[in-house]
Amino acid sequence: MRDVAKLALDTAVARGATYTDARVVAIQSRSLTTKSGRVGHSSESDSLGIGIRAIVDGAWGFAATANLSHHAVEATAARAVAIARASAFVKREKVRLAPEPPATADWTTPIRIDPFTTSIEQNLDLLFKADAEMRAVSGVTLTETGMNFVREESWFLSSQSADIHQTKYSTGAGYTAYAFAGSEIQKRSYPNSFGGQWQNRGYELIEEMKLVENARRVGEEAVALHTADQCPEGEFTLILDGSQLGLQIHESIGHPIELDRVLGMEANFAGTSFLTLDKLNHLRYGSELVNAVADARPEHGPGLGTFAYDDEGVAAQCTPIISAGRFTGYLSSRETAHTIGAARSGGTVRAEGWNRLPMIRMTNVSLLPGETPLTLDQLIADTDHGIYMETNKSWSIDDKRYNFQFGCEIGWEIKNGKRTRMLKNPSYSGITTEFWNALDAICSRQDWVIWGTPNCGKGQPQQVMGTGHGASPSRFRKIKVGSAYKS
Amino acid sequence: MLTQEQAVELFSRIRRLSSADEVEVLFSGARFALTRFANNAIHQNVEDENCIASIRTNFDGRSARAAVNQFDDATLKRAVETSEKFARVQEKDPDLLPMPTPEEAAIASDRDRPARFLEETAAITPAERAESVRQIVALADRHKLTTAGIYSTAQSLESVFNSRGLAEWHTQTLAEISITMLAGDSSGWQKLNSPDVRKLNPLQLAETAARKAVDSTHPRELPPGKYTVILEPSAALDIVGFMFWDFGGTAILDQRSFLNDRIGIKLFGDNINIWDDASHPLQAGSPFDGEGMRRRRVQLVENGIVKRVVYARGTVAKMKRSEFANKIGPIEATGHGFPLPNEIGEMPLNIVVGGSDRPRTIDQMIASTERGLLVTRLWYIREVDPYEKILTGMTRDGTFLIENGRLKNGVRNFRFNQSLISMLSNVEALGAPVRACGEESFDMVVPPMKVREFNFTEVTKF
């Protein structure tokens, strides 16, 4: 595959490219689902192709093809150059790439069990067992389970002599029990909603999930929600579980710190950001307890944003995003680094497959755990009156990332340090910086998990990317609760 | 792009590689190009070509799929073996039907298929897209605005071949332009697509987006509450589109549809009429579904009454023997299934929302409004409650206060939490349906709507 990529580089340079890189990518994926005790779908897919970037006259062009014949690769590289020439027709400034020492590397996600070596019988057997546990609960009307594996092997070469071979694995699984009765549909999911938990790991992640052990409880909670009280409306102390907090981080820290959004490059679709350049190192983003990083390094953990090199050949890094509550960093690329005075890209450029343009994406944007030992039980015991919410059900935020509203699957009222009555349809809303400044407690390392968001959409054409978010349960004061159901 | 002759030859090769009872291959592919601009310059400019063969094998009630984008013998053989291996290990599904024959898939009174492949669209070059972007940027410069957006062109194919002789083939083109105009504290937006590039007028779209940005500068903050709103077609389709996942037989059987126990009753206002029609002249897409069944025209809502839902052929028998069979309307295959095997079943994807006998223009709707809001676009819509169909989301890129029949000024953007059932019961006026597109739902034919008591619960900072 290196020869294919090298041919693309040689062709683009010969045609006039002042910089070019090529990514040959082979993706294998397995997807299995069950629904109410039957197979929903079972499939595998393979996709192979090359994507070529070229700079000509200071402007970008990109072309991609699945045809890796000599002739097709030459033609596609020539096409990238021709497209770049068209881009140069409407440009304001020449593209400036931050310097990056060319790397030669070979890296594979550390995994214990290659998921593709497990049999489909083994996979389905586990899903069916969890499915049966949920359906054993009277009142459960629909059950869905799913399991997914992805293996992505890539060869990245650039005209600046980078030569990087990476193989990344990601694994995910989860399930949902639904209960329809009267005029309500309630649901509970495990370990998380919208596909469950995902990490860059092998089948060992599935084995550690305790899928079967938790299925009965999940079914029972879905049914119990029908007789639970409606979550009240008002201002409350709020405790969020780690998975919901992971999505809160994703939407109200991860997206606004994307430097391409800040610079207006996403204005037509994903939107812009309230984090204008003047706010760097000045804005009080959150309370002093808030420390957030964007960390793609393997030592941060096996999040969906973990790698050795990004998709423009920059080594994985850890960027402090919020330091003791102060806003300190953006997600950047080689092209945007100069706009914040950085000498080097933050290494956050990623692409969905071979046929999409690499762009700034979240890596693992994580809220660091509290330094004082604190478990969830201790946090609840320390709370006189509040609401504890678990597992996302709905999420929405405006196009500058100020106003958000989240719904959760389930809540409980906390009274005098104890979890009391169950609450259905819990939701909360707020303004990003006001919310993070209201944080007054974070559970410590033992409750910290890197949650996976496998479905983050961005870009035109839209690309779907997996991102990681380390989080432990946290408490927020004076949060607006319940307005989603205000009629 | 794969030709029909090449696809026929590929299907023959794949069929010879398989020992399954039945074999089906879906070919899907596209040559796609997109020029993206921001800050009054082109910053991304891409083109790609890909084609996927998705192979399904059946063994006596067992079915599975494997997909590849390389068509050498070794890759195809491996894909066939994977599909067969995945199918063989499953329990037999008594509801899995044999693959459809051409006779079963056809519609007796098949209407003329509108031409959806236009050479003029397929022939657009990067230089031509760049020239259009240059004109959009020049218009932005004249208004002292910053512009961002896309101009894309695509040619695509969808096809279904099966070992019972079915062979369906569809090609089409699509051109799309989306433009945002940004002022210091306001913005405007327009988006449109069509199989025929000649039906898009980039400068007209740019001028409308620019006018919205200019007219909404210095937006005022209004309190949240219930307002009469005029939803432009893109805003109307983006919120209405969220309910059509529930208009399928499988959604009813799964009891995850808001239509459970509500079919045949008057759920919306008298003026709401909705149907699905893949042959509508303003629609796009293929005339067959994921099994190759021809898509039929289906009246979903008539004078506010939900009349029926759509069906994949495999859902029909399950529905007929279900507890819902006598309260669900006509039960027959309508050609709306997704490729098998799947857990979703079916969905209408060629929605037409009817207008009024006396359609009102947006200007007429504004003139008849004492106090209300004009909404250009909705954003980040998500379902809060699946049975009452409460949706949340934001307004974006051009929200205006209307007072005494005139646009008065721009307003800061709102968050809404609105039941779709209530909304479609409160439609005071409808315009003429047009082809529209947004970002939150799929393209459809939809009129602008004037809706009373639209529920805004919060306001944001811009």
Image (spheres, coloured by chain):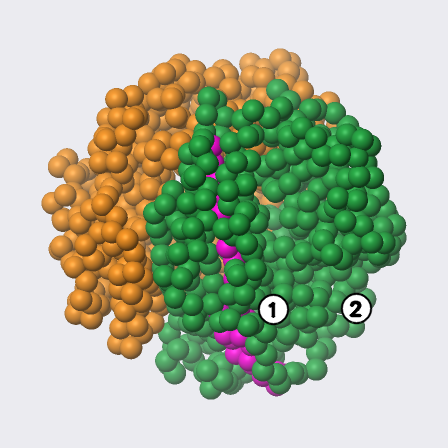
* Residue A458 screen position, x and y as percent: 57, 53
Q: On screen, A390 above or below A230?
A: below
Is residue B398 visible to the viewer in this orientation of the structure?
no
Which residue is at a point 22% across and 36% down the rendered structure image? B317
- Picture quarter with the C terminus of chain B: top right
* Residue B391 screen position, x and y as percent: 55, 31
Q: Which mark is residue A342?
A: 2
Amino acid type, callout 2: Ala
Q: Colour of chain A?
A: green
Q: Colour of chain B?
A: orange
Magenta residues (range):
A151-179
Q: Residues within 10 Å of mark 1 (few under 14, many from 20)?
A: many
Which of the 4 quarters of the picture holds residue A382? top right
Distance from Cα at disc 2 to Cα at disc 1: 21 Å
Residue A28 is left or right of residue B79, and the answer is right
Residue B410 is left or right of residue B304, and the answer is right
Which residue is at a point 73% across and 22% down the rendered structure image? B223
